Amino acid sequence: MTTTTNRKGSRANAEEHGAAQRLRILNAARQRFIEQGFHAATMESIAQLAGVSTGLSYRYFQNKRALVLALIEQNLEEDQRGLATLPASTGMKTFVDELAALYESGGGDSWNAVLFSEITAAGARDEEIQKKLVEAEALANDDFVQWLKLRDKEKSIKRSAEDARVRALLMRCLFSGLVVRSTREPDLDLGLLKAMLRRVLPLVLGDGMDNEPPRKKT
Amino acid sequence: MTTTTNRKGSRANAEEHGAAQRLRILNAARQRFIEQGFHAATMESIAQLAGVSTGLSYRYFQNKRALVLALIEQNLEEDQRGLATLPASTGMKTFVDELAALYESGGGDSWNAVLFSEITAAGARDEEIQKKLVEAEALANDDFVQWLKLRDKEKSIKRSAEDARVRALLMRCLFSGLVVRSTREPDLDLGLLKAMLRRVLPLVLGDGMDNEPPRKKT
Amino acid sequence: MTTTTNRKGSRANAEEHGAAQRLRILNAARQRFIEQGFHAATMESIAQLAGVSTGLSYRYFQNKRALVLALIEQNLEEDQRGLATLPASTGMKTFVDELAALYESGGGDSWNAVLFSEITAAGARDEEIQKKLVEAEALANDDFVQWLKLRDKEKSIKRSAEDARVRALLMRCLFSGLVVRSTREPDLDLGLLKAMLRRVLPLVLGDGMDNEPPRKKT
Amino acid sequence: MTTTTNRKGSRANAEEHGAAQRLRILNAARQRFIEQGFHAATMESIAQLAGVSTGLSYRYFQNKRALVLALIEQNLEEDQRGLATLPASTGMKTFVDELAALYESGGGDSWNAVLFSEITAAGARDEEIQKKLVEAEALANDDFVQWLKLRDKEKSIKRSAEDARVRALLMRCLFSGLVVRSTREPDLDLGLLKAMLRRVLPLVLGDGMDNEPPRKKT
DNA sequence: AATGAATGAGCCTTCATTCAT
DNA sequence: TATGAATGAAGGCTCATTCAT
């Protein structure tokens, strides 16, 4: 217990406390949504898991939907953090292993397969969620494009700006596809998966690739 | 009131009638699930759209969940029908165009993006749905593997049995990924999408590919 | 139990049944609103009193507010029925007695003092209720103006059209005032009340009144 | 922070401060009750408007109901103040204009039409409120009776003691009726209203009136 | 086979009130 | 005196499912 003697400290503590509460509720929501889905998870069970009263949850989140919006943000932040700490020199082998691990664990945390589908579905029925979702995806995509460009530069590979966007798109499709498939083909042979990844990831990472073929106009 | 003269005819008519009713209810459910999601769509609105009473719906489907199970089956059948009529000689250009169209339309009918996510999410909370889903995916996957093998044979390409499975897996990941992304990146530049597909589809179709690299043991 | 042999009869019964249900719920609502007020009366207690389930109430009334709207209509209808059966020849003595009785009983049924205030207050916070209320009042006012004119005609009294409106307004103010006062001065000496009425009602009924003074422009 | 040098001064300051706080809270409650009604107005919004914390409100008023009780008192005091400053010589014209203005403004402040109905309704559900309300009405009535008597004396009119009570009752009924009608007939033609008042107010003020008719026994 | 009225459990949300600081 | 975080009970409303007809 930090005891502070001045108001500023006290207020800072209150803010910290509030942020911590908020996070606990949000994490509880994440867990319950994953376990039971958005509709089946009740606000009461979320509050209970967070160790607060139902009413208090509504001080931190306007309503149940606001939890989804906050989760989207949280996911984006975690993605960005993850990418920021991924060395540009990361080799294919690492990707193969990490993607396989992702598959095996059902999408990890921020890409949890069930949550991913729940949020996608929720977006279809709620304009605000959809808007937030599209925005977050765009930002995440930009981040990955930047990462690819940085990687090219480090490896002294010259490629067109569009090329990075094409590769990022492929990566994101693969990624999303893997996440979804992890629930629909949970018993997939990981060896098969890795073989697939080893075949397709070079297209994403671009190592030793020929110059991309010319793009046709739409 | 249709008057039938013999019992057999009458029963046959009745069965036909019943099957038609069932189908109308199922289609209504599909439409409502797509429009409003599984939870928001009420049994009453589904029955209304189908032109029957609420009570009658329960003669054809034991409960709301049964509608999801039936939809999974319906999707599988439509996939199978689609693959059965897809010539083994189909070239990459066709695939590129069809996948782009799929993206643009949000996943078409049996792969409707919203329904797809709804069902994925539903599977996470319902063992029976999950079981059915996994089964259907396995069958659909086998079908595609067969199609690839047939294609290789027609083109007189010799490949290992596993190679087809690897390529099928890639295709399914791509497919699922595209469906999901169509809701999360609805404004994606279709030219970019096609460029991506032109780059990756050769890996699936295997035309002009080098021999696949040796697979490591898991 | 009336047994009907044809569909029409059956449907008619269903409609009758529905109307009866609706009425029972509405009357239950009236009673509970009077006893407990609009906010304190719960939908459950209303349904219970009506002998139906909570859910069924919502088949007949979209929401709690709709009960208020229906009550306003019901009140208007009862007022109109009451006025329609009030002989134009009704003398002052009858009015005095009836108004005193009204006071003593707290406003009777359609003018129940508590309900009256509840609805007035509700109107202040709900535009739709307010609109309905104003409409109903205007209609009720017109009715009373007509009644006064009819009375004048029967008594062969010639008065300006505006005169009837002035007297109707006075009557309505008195009426509303009495209703409200019946809760705020419940122990009022009825003799005093009657004395007051005997003094002011001639102005309303116009018997033996001088010609009204000329009206100034606003 | 005001620094006071002696205890007495300090306590006096504190008391003043407390009274001011109390008044600010009460006025905030009045405003919110008028805007939103008794139930819709939350203690938090009242405190906020008063510029104090929720918890502090409970130091000045035991609970939400206590605010209503205090408002009834406040209204009574304002009425008494108003009457005390109303010259006994006030003529009918002034009354007509002031009552019309009252109508137009929805009852002014202490007789605000919405608050008036809210409080009336609240009294029906709460014995303590009802008691206070009846008491306040009796006092206000007495005041008006006194005022009428004073007026008679100034005009050297001799009337029975009961006569003043009859006229006071009429006035209060008119008053209450006008207040209520101002919400139920907000678009009333003010000319009509004034015509009505000019006709009925002589009965209240008693100027040039014949001796009242003999009163019958109840 | 067909209807749709009826049920009732359950969820989201609000808010008067309390209390640790 | 003052704060505002926290509680928790309760209410409006929905909807899957049943059942009398």
Image: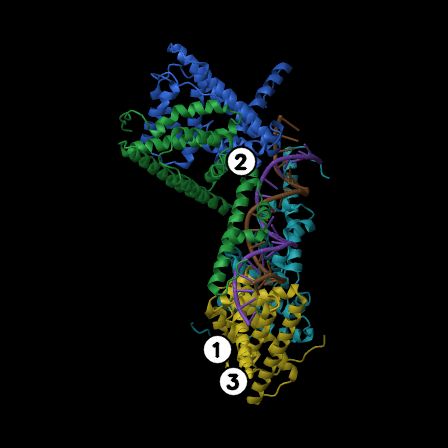
Chain colours: A green, B blue, C cyan, D yellow, E brown, F purple
> Which residue corresponds to the image point at 65% horizontal and 70% vertical from the top-left?
C96
**Alpha carbon separation for disc pair 3 and 1:** 42 Å
Q: Can residue C164 be seen in this view?
A: no
Which is nearer the N-term, disc 3 or disc 1?
Answer: 1
Q: Name above or below for residue C52 compared with residue D60.
A: above
Residue that mark 2 sits on: B38
Q: Decide: is B198 above or below C37.
A: above
Dot 1 corresponds to which residue? D2
Tell me the distance, in whole angstroms, between the alpha carbons under discs 2 and 3.
73 Å
Tell me residue C40's x, y (percent). 63, 57
Q: Establish whether labels 2 and 3 are both on one chain.
A: no
Vertical relation: B38 (above or below) C46 = above
> Disc number at residue D87?
3
Q: Report the front residue among C140 and D25.
A: D25
Q: Label for residue C167? A: none
- Mark 2 or 3, which is nearer the eye? 2
Residue nearest the observer in this picture, D98 or A118: A118
